[in-house]
Image (cartoon, rainbow, N blue to C red):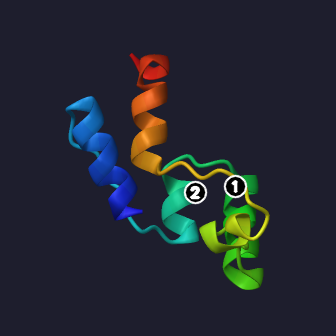
Amino acid sequence: MSQVAQTSSRVFGAAMQAPVMTKKDMLDAGVHPGWTRVQDLLATVGYSARPKNARAFDSPLTSFAEWVERHRHAWQ
């Protein structure tokens, strides 16, 4: 996630962070409890949305940097 924060910081010209948080940290920060359960599930079973999997189906890929540049107007 640090790469996402670095790319977002560069594109938007503002310092952004991607802290690693425990479930308690997330709840204390006001994250919806359902989202913490999703994170637990992904950490347990894994997350298969990986570029190599998409390539197997000839799906077009876009880097995060390209995507955020293309959609930056939505946050301005």
Residue underneath mark 2: 27
Within-10-Å neighbours for mark 1: few <14, some 14–19, many 20+: few
Please state which amino acid type lies under the numbered disc 2.
Leu
Question: Residue 13, position in %: x, y?
Answer: 20, 32
- Name which quarter of the figure residue 38 lies in: bottom right
Question: Residue 50, position in %: x, y?
Answer: 64, 69
Residue 1 visible in image: yes
Front-most of residues 33 and 55: 55
User: Residue shown at 54%/48% (left/top)?
Assistant: 62
Residue 49 visible in image: no
Q: Is residue 56 above or below residue 14?
A: below
Of the numbered discs 2 and 1, the one sitting upstream in the chain is 2
**Where residue 20 is drawn, which disc sits there?**
none
Residue underneath mark 1: 35
Quadrant occupied by the C terminus? top left
Q: Identify the secondary structure beneath mark 2.
A: helix
- Name which quarter of the figure residue 15 lies in: top left
Front-most of residues 13 and 41: 13
Q: CA distance from mark 2 to mark 1?
A: 9 Å
Q: Is residue 21 above or below residue 32?
A: below
